[in-house]
Image (spheres, rainbow, N blue to C red):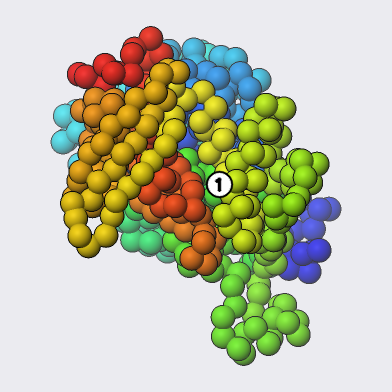
């Protein structure tokens, strides 16, 4: 199908030497960035897809950071099928021990330990001298090796570290047993030429460099993360650390989908290959965007809504005559299917079940029945139903399956007259409660009414509305982020009525906060 555009080395020429290890850090560096917090279940869902996609190493979290992180790394380790499951730890024994415990159940587990090596990190972050750093490198890697043969060591802020000292640290890490050495551009400061030169220098100067795989970990502060990572590969690195949709601290990490497709499409100048099933890239991007409520930029390479759209007449004409005139990759190669019109209100259960299978969902009988009822209700209100509509509907069904608070009814008075008023009925643990509130706009009135029924102190750092498809009857997908007691959750709701979707999203976020302590009563759950 896309073999004419796949220029990665032919199967016969694929060796371990030109294979690039894909190390995904969506669940660690990605999840660490403000607002991208995922729930336990969401992390498992992402990990499962990464594993299915052929990611070699999944960095599942930072086990010492919190009990939640520990438990999610542990569960991901238990469920892993093919990928190596990795946990992050500082250069401290208590971090490493906790990390080892979390990854213990993985068929193949890795401990990733790091320390800041640059003068800035040594002086201002840790207040220690070079000798102490070297000591900690040896001690931390040795400790990690006492648990597993697969140990990665990272020189945080490597690109701003004195070259001699960086080489000394790398040599010590390998001597102590590190099997992967990561050279991060932690602050996204390097240019491709500089980064390649640094990687080449370390590989050439460190006497035992042949005993470890070298890795890139490039941040995107100057928009150079992918370019720097590819330059690192050209210089001899064979592992790339990256994240779906480029998620990560600040401006993010190198985007996995861009790295993988660049290697696949330009194998003529970058003779490498990866084990990634690229047809799952679009699904992974959508999943991560959904669970984090970080929307994907429309013109983002590979997975943006416009990445394969041809608007101008000349381009459309060219693509229709011969796709390669304006397409360097096929949409199919990244798993993009044409949005298809699905059944209308006359479609039956069987067709609905088949459609769900096509979209990658497998629901139990009860969930399927509930989703079908909602599909019928939607079909009554909306003329054309697309795949995206079904996806939004089923995602909501899955997310709300165990909710203790549910939206039963909503009436809103909005418009220029003011004040806007909302009357909402919620089902809270099986009992109905109704409240009416006025507000500064209809959404404010709805949220105040919900708060009156379920009192809480949570802050609302994000309220976001997106149309699922085109047209004035499109479903709105609303994301609401709530923050309480240092915990951030994101709820989502969809409906053809934006206000109903808003109420559902807010209630979904409350349910997630409530889920952190199942014994608490909703009325008191957030009182801190
Ligand atoms: O950016 C960085 O240096 C990191 C390390 C922990 C690898 O994320
Ligand atoms: Zn990082």
Q: For the C terminus, which image quadrant? A: top left
Give coordinates of residue 68: x percent, y percent: 41, 20
Q: Residues within 10 Å of mark 1 (few under 14, many from 20)?
A: some
Residue shown at 52% from the left, 59% from the top: 474
Against 236, residue 262 (above or below) is: below
Q: On the rendered structure, is 300 left or right of 65?
A: right
Query: Is residue 260 in view from this perspective?
Result: no
Furthest toward the top, the residue is 519
Q: Nearer the viewer, residue 344 or 492?
A: 344
The correct choice, above or below, for 388 with respect to 74 in the image is below
- Please indicate, yes or no, whether residue 431 appears anywhere in the rendered image: yes
Q: Is mark 1 within 8 Å of ligand 2?
A: no
* Element on which disc 1 rests: helix
| Farthest residue, direction right | 12
Q: Residue at x 69, y 61 (%)?
A: 341
Q: Residue at x 47, y 58 (%)?
A: 467
Q: Is residue 327 above or below residue 486?
A: below
Residue 524 location, x and y as percent?
26, 16
Disc 1 target residue: 392
Q: Name the quarter where the N terminus is drawn.
A: bottom right
Q: Is the residue 98 above or below the residue 373 in the image?
A: above
Q: Nearer the viewer, residue 164 or 333?
A: 333
- Residue 329 coordinates in the image, percent (x, y): 67, 68
Among the 4 quarters of the image, the one containing residue 512 = top left
Q: Residue at x 34, y 36 (%)?
A: 424
């Amino acid at each position: 199908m896309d073999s004419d555009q796949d220029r990665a080395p032919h199967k016969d020429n694929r060796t371990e030497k030109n294979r690039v290890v894909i190390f995904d850090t969506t669940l660690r560096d990605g999840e660490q960035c403000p607002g991208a917090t995922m729930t336990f279940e969401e992390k498992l869902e992402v990990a499962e897809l990464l594993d299915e996609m052929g990611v070699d190493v999944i960095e599942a979290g930072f086990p010492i950071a919190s009990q939640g992180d520990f438990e999610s790394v542990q569960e991901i380790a238990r469920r892993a099928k093919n990928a190596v499951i990795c946990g992050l730890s500082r250069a401290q024994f208590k971090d490493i021990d906790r990390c080892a415990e979390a990854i213990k159940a993985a068929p193949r587990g890795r401990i990733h330990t790091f320390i800041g090596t640059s003068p800035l990190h040594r002086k201002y972050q840790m207040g220690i001298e070079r000798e102490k750093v070297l000591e900690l490198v040896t001690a931390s890697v040795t400790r990690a090796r006492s648990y597993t043969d697969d140990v990665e060591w990272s020189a945080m802020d490597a690109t701003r570290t004195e070259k001699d000292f960086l080489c000394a640290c790398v040599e010590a890490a390998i001597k102590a047993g590190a099997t992967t050495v990561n050279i991060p551009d932690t602050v996204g400061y390097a240019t491709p030429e500089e980064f390649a030169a640094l990687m080449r220098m370390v590989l050439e100067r460190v006497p035992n460099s042949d005993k470890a795989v070298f890795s890139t970990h490039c941040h995107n502060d100057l928009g150079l993360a992918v370019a720097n990572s590819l330059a690192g590969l050209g210089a001899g690195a064979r592992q790339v650390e990256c994240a779906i949709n480029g998620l990560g601290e600040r401006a993010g990490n190198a985007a996995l989908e861009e790295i993988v497709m660049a290697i696949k499409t330009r194998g003529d100048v970058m003779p490498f290959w990866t084990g990634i099933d690229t047809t799952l890239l679009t699904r992974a991007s959508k999943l991560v965007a959904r669970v984090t409520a970080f929307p994907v930029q429309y013109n983002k390479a590979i997975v943006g809504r416009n990445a394969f759209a041809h608007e101008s007449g000349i381009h459309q004409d060219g693509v229709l005559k011969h796709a390669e005139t304006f397409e360097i990759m096929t949409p199919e190669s990244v798993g993009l299917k044409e949005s298809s019109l699905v059944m209308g209100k006359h479609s039956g259960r069987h067709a609905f079940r088949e459609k769900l299978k096509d979209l990658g969902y497998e629901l139990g009988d009860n969930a399927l029945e509930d989703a079908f009822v909602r599909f019928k209700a939607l079909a009554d209100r909306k003329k054309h139903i697309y795949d995206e509509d079904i996806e939004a509907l089923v995602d909501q069904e899955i997310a709300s399956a165990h909710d203790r608070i549910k939206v039963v009814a909503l009436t809103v008075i909005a418009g220029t007259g003011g004040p806007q008023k909302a009357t909402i009925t919620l089902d809270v643990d099986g009992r109905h409660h109704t409240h009416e509130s006025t507000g500064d706009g209809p959404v404010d009135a709805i949220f105040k009414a919900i708060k009156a029924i379920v009192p809480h102190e949570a802050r609302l750092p994000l309220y976001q509305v997106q149309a699922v498809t085109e047209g004035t009857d499109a479903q709105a997908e609303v994301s609401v982020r709530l923050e309480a007691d240092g915990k951030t959750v994101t709820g989502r709701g969809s409906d053809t009525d934006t206000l109903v979707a808003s109420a559902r999203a807010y209630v979904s976020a409350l349910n997630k906060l409530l889920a952190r302590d199942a014994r608490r009563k909703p009325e008191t759950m957030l009182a801190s």
